[in-house]
């Protein structure tokens, strides 16, 4: 890897194109190096993972609404939409919109945390949709996805968006655009311009993940994917983009990030170096914010030691800066303690999550968020006794550059009314690559089966799994079938309607 220095350049100080971050990213995207079997294997795992959570969420209102919008844009030879029959296809940008919303709705797919947050699996829906519409093969798709993951992860390592209250899709959209460019075999110049277009249109505020969190949390990555498809389309027609998008005097670093004196070092693969960033990412065993995964596993074993919840005086979670300030009491969001809060808010409240995990000793993507469960008096009482504090030890572990030392957990102290303390800690979730039970192919398929049970048929399940496991060999025609179909009588919003504008 090489570190690419990035800073603001006044207009009078010319920055050559070859020295711009967007150009360096485009060079990575057009460097057609060998892709290792373990990387291909993980790409397949993540396509299975995305499909499982999307099908489980297919009839939830935001996903059904996104699908209804996509169905108003049919296109012969287009892309498939999760749940819909494979012989019905739609314009790829709208398929990316519907499928991206489905993947994100349950907050249950892969993650990467470093200087900022990310869900790199959000790269898959738009790149796959374009691949289907443009008659690309399984190997073409793999190349595009490897680039999307690589650039996304490396931006997240280097540039913090959160401290400037910018949403993390600002790193996602340029990665999606670059992955689409690689898929289509575009030139370095074209991908450079597409990246710049994508950056320019995708900077939004973090209010989407603050306070009363709405369904936009699910739509935001899908919106980025749609913007990325459109950005690439414009560039393919000969259009350009604001430049230099990162380093310009009035561009994103100067006015949206660290300011005119801001400096970053972005890691990027050397020419000829394999792209392996996907192997640094990790999926979720539990449907909740990633920073809660290890703490949920920890709560499962600690809850067994509490005989009576009325005996608990308070619960203190020692954890990282990000966990404390984003999903902990450091956020200062009263909504995170509100039994009437939305699911989107509750899955970003570590206090709520720990209360449920302690009491139930299990986690379910639906049952754990039901209003009746959230409003149970003994749960609310326990929930309101839980608080977080930032611990420098856990903040340092969160930001450790060594993937084998990076940790996202914490230490939990349960104090009983008699003064007795129950104390335990856990650094990484059981399913993490460095955890007690790292997820392998069988675990991804088990998760798929658990989430799609009673929704799809056994024959459809077998067809999809067999197809995706053969991804490197898929022809363009076979890739068009890479979708999970739900019987239409089990799928809401399965026909074009006239409720909106489209």
Image: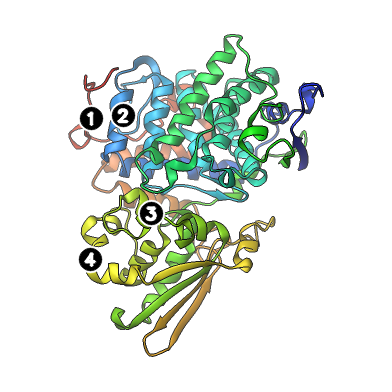
Q: Secondary structure at mark 3?
A: loop
Residue to which mark 2 is pinned: 67
State the residue position of label 1: 493
Pinpoint residue 238: horizontal percent, then vertical percent. 61, 9
- Scheme of colours in the image: rainbow
Tell me the residue at 57%/9% (across/down). 237
**Residue 407, image x and y in percent?**
59, 62
Taking depth in this image into account, of 27 and 212 the one nearest to the observer is: 212
Residue 32 shown left or right of residue 290 in the figure: right
Q: Are marks 3 and 1 in contact (CB under 8 Å)?
A: no
Q: Nearer the viewer, residue 189 or 240?
A: 240
Q: CA distance from mark 2 to mark 3?
A: 23 Å
Residue 179: where, in percent of width, then height? Answer: 58, 29
Q: Residue at x 49, y 47 (%)?
A: 110
Residue 376: numbered disc: 4
Other-residue count near label 1 (Cα within 10 Å), few / some / many at <14 / 14–19 / ≥20 = some
């Amino acid at each position: 890897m090489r570190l690419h220095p990035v800073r603001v350049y006044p207009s009078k100080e010319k920055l050559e194109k070859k020295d711009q971050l967007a150009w360096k990213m485009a060079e990575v995207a057009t460097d057609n190096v060998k892709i290792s079997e373990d990387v291909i294997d993980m790409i397949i795992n993540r396509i299975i993972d995305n499909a499982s959570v999307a099908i489980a969420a297919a009839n939830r209102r935001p996903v059904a609404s996104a699908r209804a919008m996509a169905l108003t844009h049919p296109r012969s030879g287009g892309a498939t939409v999760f749940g819909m029959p494979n012989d019905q296809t739609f314009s790829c940008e709208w398929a990316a919109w519907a499928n991206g919303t489905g993947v994100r709705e349950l907050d249950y797919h892969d993650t990467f945390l470093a200087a900022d947050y990310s869900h790199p699996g959000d790269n898959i829906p738009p790149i796959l949709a374009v691949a289907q519409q443009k008659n690309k093969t399984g190997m073409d798709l793999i190349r595009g996805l490897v680039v999307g993951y690589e650039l996304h992860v490396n931006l997240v390592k280097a540039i913090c968006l959160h401290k400037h209250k910018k949403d993390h899709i600002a790193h996602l959209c340029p990665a999606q655009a670059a992955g689409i460019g690689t898929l289509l075999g575009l030139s370095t110049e074209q991908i450079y311009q597409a990246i710049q277009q994508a950056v320019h249109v995708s900077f939004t505020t973090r209010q989407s993940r603050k306070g009363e969190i709405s369904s936009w949390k699910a739509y935001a990555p899908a919106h980025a994917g749609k913007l990325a498809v459109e950005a690439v389309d414009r560039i393919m027609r000969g259009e350009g983009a604001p430049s230099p998008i990162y380093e310009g005097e009035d561009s994103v670093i100067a006015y949206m990030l660290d300011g005119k004196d801001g400096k970053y070092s972005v890691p990027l693969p050397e020419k000829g170096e394999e792209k392996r960033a996907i192997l640094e990412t990790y999926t979720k065993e539990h449907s909740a914010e990633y920073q809660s995964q290890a703490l949920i596993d920890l709560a499962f074993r600690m809850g067994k030691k509490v005989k009576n919840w009325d005996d608990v005086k308070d619960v203190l979670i020692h954890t990282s800066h990000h966990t404390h300030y984003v999903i902990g009491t450091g956020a200062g969001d009263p909504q995170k303690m509100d039994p009437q809060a939305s699911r989107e808010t509750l899955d970003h409240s570590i206090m709520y999550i720990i209360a449920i995990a302690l009491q139930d000793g299990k986690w379910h993507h639906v049952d754990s968020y039901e209003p009746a469960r959230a409003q149970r008096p003994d749960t609310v009482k326990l929930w309101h006794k839980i608080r977080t504090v930032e611990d420098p030890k856990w903040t340092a572990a969160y930001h450790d550059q060594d993937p084998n030392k990076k940790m996202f957990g914490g230490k939990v102290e349960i104090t009983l009314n008699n003064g007795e303390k129950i104390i335990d800690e856990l650094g990484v979730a059981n399913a993490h690559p460095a955890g007690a039970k790292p997820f392998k192919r069988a675990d991804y398929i088990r998760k798929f089966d658990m989430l799609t049970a009673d929704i799809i048929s056994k024959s459809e399940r077998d067809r999809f799994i067999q197809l995706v496991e053969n991804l490197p060999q898929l022809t363009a025609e076979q890739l068009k079938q890479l979708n999970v179909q739900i019987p239409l009588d089990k799928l809401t919003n399965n026909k074009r309607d006239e409720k909106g504008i489209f």
